[in-house]
Amino acid sequence: MRTLGTSLVLALIAAVVVMAGQPVTPAAKLPQAPAAQADAAMMKTFTTAADVQGLLAKAKAERKEGQVMAAEHILSLAPYVTNLGYRPVEGAVAVHEKEAELVYVIDGGGTLIIGGTVVGEKRTNEANLSGTAIDGGAVRTIAKGDFAIIPEGTPHQFKPAGGALVLMTMHVPRPVGGAQ
């Protein structure tokens, strides 16, 4: 549990580093529009290890047969959301065109395929693509405690091995092409 807490702190530090170049306006000086009030209601800046275990139990219980992943919010501070992803089966290839993805392996292990060319590519929504496989990607074995950051526009796929893969993920909005 101590490793999980330390890892979450490291992930949040990474988010702060990414945001370091962004101008900051104190929230107390901004008028609270309805959208801002909704964002404030979605803000969750602390989660205990016990809370994470509860979220994992909830994700396991709510996942439907055949569903690739069940996700639960761990932390949120707009525009950032940190999710727990419970993945007992292999998922589709994903490409997030406008967001990098920070990943921490909470539990389990498997394979992360990253890069290469998407096979069977189709548009999921205005900012994401999916596919059935990756041709020519780098194959990395991942296990509990590992971190990865997947740049925007990069194909990636998670394949659990020997049980469920439990991930903490945070999508980090980035300018198109990663230019600062």
Image: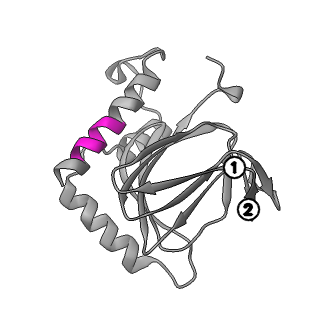
The kind of secondary structure element at disc 2 is strand
Report the front residue among 120 and 122. 120
Residue 133: image tag: 2
Q: What residue sits right under mark 1 in the picture?
A: 137
* Left or right, 90 with reference to 70: right
Tell me the mark number nearer the camera, choosing from 2 and 1. Answer: 1
Q: CA distance from mark 2 to mark 1?
A: 10 Å
In the image, is residue 157 above or below residue 161? Answer: above
Where residue 15 sits, quadrant-wise, is: top left
In this view, which residue lies farthest toward the bottom?
65
* Left or right, 103 with reference to 29: right
Q: Which residues are magenta?
A: 5-11
Given the image, on which type of amino acid does mark 2 rest? Ala
**Visible residue check, residue 131:** no
What residue is rendered at 42% in x and 77% in y? 62
Report the front residue among 18 and 127. 18
Percent position of residue 59, x then y: 39, 71
In which quadrant is the C terminus drawn?
top right
In the image, is residue 154 above or below residue 64? Answer: above
